[in-house]
Amino acid sequence: MYSSPSAESAPFARRNDTEVVIRNRENEILFIDARTLGDDGANEEGYVLLTDEDKIRISNTLFSWQSKEWTEIYKDIPEFCYSASINEIREKDYTLTPSKYIEFIDHDLGIDYEKEMVAIQRNMRELLQEDKNIQDQLMNAFKGIGYELK
């Protein structure tokens, strides 16, 4: 999450050692959700670390949002970023949780639940039948050694 500088701040930022003109973002906040980014803890420390590609993606998003041409080059991206106005934040009782603003996509929409439930029922019937067969084998084994279970 990045909040806007005050109106007194210089309208410049440094990008790749170059000063660039930035727009006034007063009363706006850029929310970035980076939970799906990173190396999944595949490093010596075991912490999730952002990859170089992740850092570039985040910085490019921030710079496009700050840019004077932001309406042409910045886009809200579901499950990644959202530019919220102070009015939106006020409407949500000043909650600054990114998930309150960044759109979530239900990836399960393409599932045919009827078909999946039929498959689950079939698997369950097979498991229950296998369980019954094992129980019958145990009952017969105990009966065969003279210790029938009743």
Image (cartoon, rainbow, N blue to C red):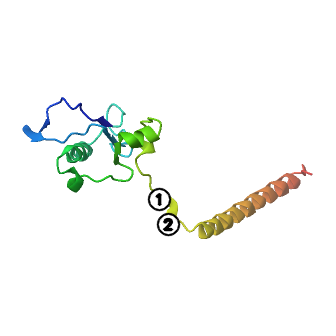
* Rendering quarter of residue 66: top left
Q: Nearer the viewer, residue 13 or 113?
A: 13
* Rendering quarter of residue 43: top left
**How far from the left and from the top, in percent, is residue 11?**
14, 36
Q: For the residue labelled by badge 1, is the local secondary structure a helix, a strand or a loop?
A: helix
- Specify the farthest residue to the right: 150
Q: How many marks?
A: 2
Q: Residue at x 32, y 33 (%)?
A: 44
Proximity of marks 1 and 2: CB atoms separated by less than 8 Å:
yes
Q: Nearer the viewer, residue 29 or 79?
A: 29
Label 2 Cα crowd, 10 Å radius (few <14 / some 14-19 / many 20+): few
**How far from the left and from the top, in percent, is residue 126?**
69, 65
Q: Which mark is residue 110?
A: 2
Location of mark 1 (residue): 107
Q: Is residue 137 visible?
A: yes
**How far from the left and from the top, in percent, is residue 45?**
33, 31
Q: For the residue labelled by badge 2, is the local secondary structure a helix, a strand or a loop?
A: helix
- Work out whether 103 lies above or below 133: above
Q: Residue at x 41, y 45 (%)?
A: 101
What's the amino acid at mark 1? His
